[in-house]
Amino acid sequence: MKAIQLTNGFGFEELTMTELDKPTPGPKEVLICMRAASLNYRDLVVLGGLMPIEVKFPFIPLSDGAGEIVAIGQGVTRFQVGQRVAGNFQQRFIGGNPRPGVLEESLGGPLNGVAAEYVVLHEDGVVPIPDHLTYEEASTLPIAALTAWSMLIEYGGLQAGDTVLLQGTGGVSIFGLQFSLMTGARVIITSSSNDKLERAKALGAWQTINYSEVPDWDKAALELTGGVDHVLDVGGAATMGKSINALRTGGTVSMVGFLSGLTISEYDVSSILHKAATVRGSQVGNRDHFEKMNRAIAHHRLHPVIDRVFPLERIGEAIALLAEGKQYFGKIVVQI
């Protein structure tokens, strides 16, 4: 089978197309013929050697993918050959709250990922995908969709009439827009691109803010609403303070990304106290959340937003596009 690997170490230049033996599923395992994978910012960090995890080389990257089960091992009860599935990002995070060790069971680092024609996973780490989605669409669900769903719906308790502030137009934010609208919430979305803001409006955003033209986007959000109920913060260090400032009293900031860095120096915590704010970190979500989300996606016939699709042989171009950061809307997908 064909697979993409980091052969000897980290770095985009280390990515190579290799030929490997097709794996065989063991007890309680399923063999998946992968059809598509989607890219996340996390993949860039892992490929660059910047994620504080240990991987064994040669290493297969990418966390998110979807495909068809073509063989099952002894004792498998949850699936049959022919079912369309996706892997759960954290393989043994089945239900309940985040726990120690969850991140050590993650696909695409430290576990091998899905950038291969065939992948073996334990049946507990696999979920069925909605029938109406293509494999390309379904490949976007494990991290981006589940992060937005878990933070807004499962942990955030999003309700009709709430206001959600979303940063940028990447995968998590666009899923956040779609799920918010699904529940009857209003959405404010930020971007430095007026073209992207118009696309967000076409998807149903209530208000938009160009943060290049309005650097104090938090104050603009306050003026629009008196304080928002939820913020999905993808920026990290550079946006945390403004995200909290944009909240209503008792509002919630979900930290789901770190595009601007991880370290906040000399931060004044009084704003958290003054707002009685909840600040929640994300570990994506468990399998129960994934299955519930897929039922909602199927019921509402929701379609993920895909910017571009690349063949596996051009994965380098796909990663370069992701690294540019501002040149895509929604998700970038690789066909396998």
Image: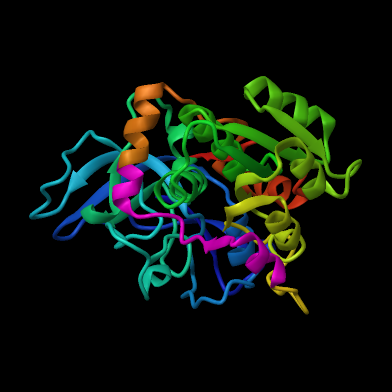
Q: Residue at x 36, y 52 (%)?
A: 88
| Relative side of 18 to 238, left or right | left
Q: Position of residue 197 (x, y in %)?
A: 76, 30
| Relative side of 31 to 160, left or right | left
In this rendering, the answer to whether 99 lies above or below 162 is below
Question: Along the line of sight, which residue is nearer the eye, 232 or 311?
Answer: 232
| Relative side of 21 to 269, left or right | left
How many marks overall? 0
In this rendering, the answer to whether 318 lies above or below 28 is above
Residue placed farthest to the right in the image? 213
Is 251 colored magenta in this rendering?
no
Question: Along the line of sight, which residue is nearer the eye, 19 or 37?
Answer: 37
Q: Position of residue 230 (x, y in %)?
A: 58, 47
Residue 80, by quadrant, is: top left
Answer whether residue 71 is visible to the viewer in this image.
yes
Residue 6, by quadrant, is: bottom right
Answer whether residue 328 is visible to the viewer in this image.
no
In this rendering, the answer to whether 144 lies above or below 100 is above
Question: Along the line of sight, which residue is nearer the eye, 13 or 29?
Answer: 29
Q: Position of residue 283 (x, y in %)?
A: 46, 61
| Relative side of 229 to 189, left or right | left
What range is drawn magenta here? 270-291
Residue placed farthest to the left in the image? 75
Q: Residue at x 34, y 52 (%)?
A: 119
Q: Position of residue 97 (x, y in %)?
A: 34, 63
